[in-house]
Image: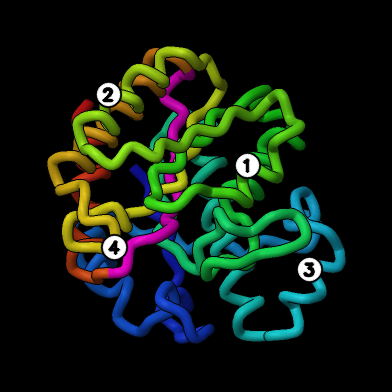
Amino acid sequence: MKIYFHPDFLKHYAFDPAAEPGRLEPALAALERKYPLHEPQSAVEDDILLVHTPRHWLSIAKDQLLHHTALLAAGAAKAAAETAAGGEHAFALCRPPGHHASSDSCWGFCYYNNIAVAVSSLLDRKMIDSALIVDFDLHFGDGTANIFKRNDAVFFWHSRESAPTLFLEALENDLEKYNPNIIAVSAGFDRGVDDWGGMLNIKHYHRIGALLARSARQKCGNRLFAVLEGGYNPRALAANIEAFLQGMEEE
């Protein structure tokens, strides 16, 4: 398992819940005790323009600190995707999140669509032919769905089930329907019992990780990576991320 993180993700780049000081520090402390951390390179303009318009690029670039951090987040997602393409699991502990960023607009604390940049980069370089994006965030990843809605090579999964048992059953059953080259995960932890959604506990997140890892092993040569999206209770976020990654490793 490779963890991608940059110290600049701790900087206060915007005034929104995802950018709150202290949000990532407990997760960072938990992960660095177990895993070596790898610093990603920033994404570059060509990476971003795979999924976003030049107008969107220019609108984000007006804010230098925000732009710097958003490019690092997209770069962390891209690095995790490249690692996964080689058959090793990876996780990007990054911010800002990205799944509410469409080609020419964004909202919901997102600026560039990290998971879309990562998957599109692999497709563009012909490192994969298809991808399944699993978004288990509380909120529907409208930006990701919009970007790939006419792309037959990319499948997008999100469930609105509120009961944990039904949510896990839906994920397990639906994973059987796909045969992608890679599984990319928009890992939002705001469904957590101590977060906005009040639904999933650490055992559920462990199970999600295990289900995804099993599917990746069976369907696509173990190619699996995840990128942080939501999750706003710092200590709960740390515990849920740790459980999720343990599930990925133990399957």
Labelled disc at residue 145: 1
Q: How is the image coloured?
A: rainbow
Q: Is residue 225 above or below residue 132?
A: below
- Most prominent secondary structure in the magenta stretch? loop
In which quadrant of the rendered image does the N terminus lie?
Answer: top left
Q: Which mark is residue 57?
A: 3
**Residue 79 spot, x, y in % from top left:** 55, 50
Q: Quadrant of the C terminus?
A: top left
In the picture, the disc for residue 196 is 4
Q: Earlier in the sequence, mark 4 or mark 1?
A: 1
Cα distance between the residues tagged 2 and 4: 22 Å
Q: CA distance from mark 1 to mark 3?
A: 19 Å
Q: Residues within 10 Å of mark 4 (few under 14, many from 20)?
A: some
* Residue where numbered disc 2 is placed: 169
Q: Nearer the viewer, mark 1 or mark 3?
A: 1
Per the model, the C-alpha gap separating discs 1 and 2 is: 22 Å
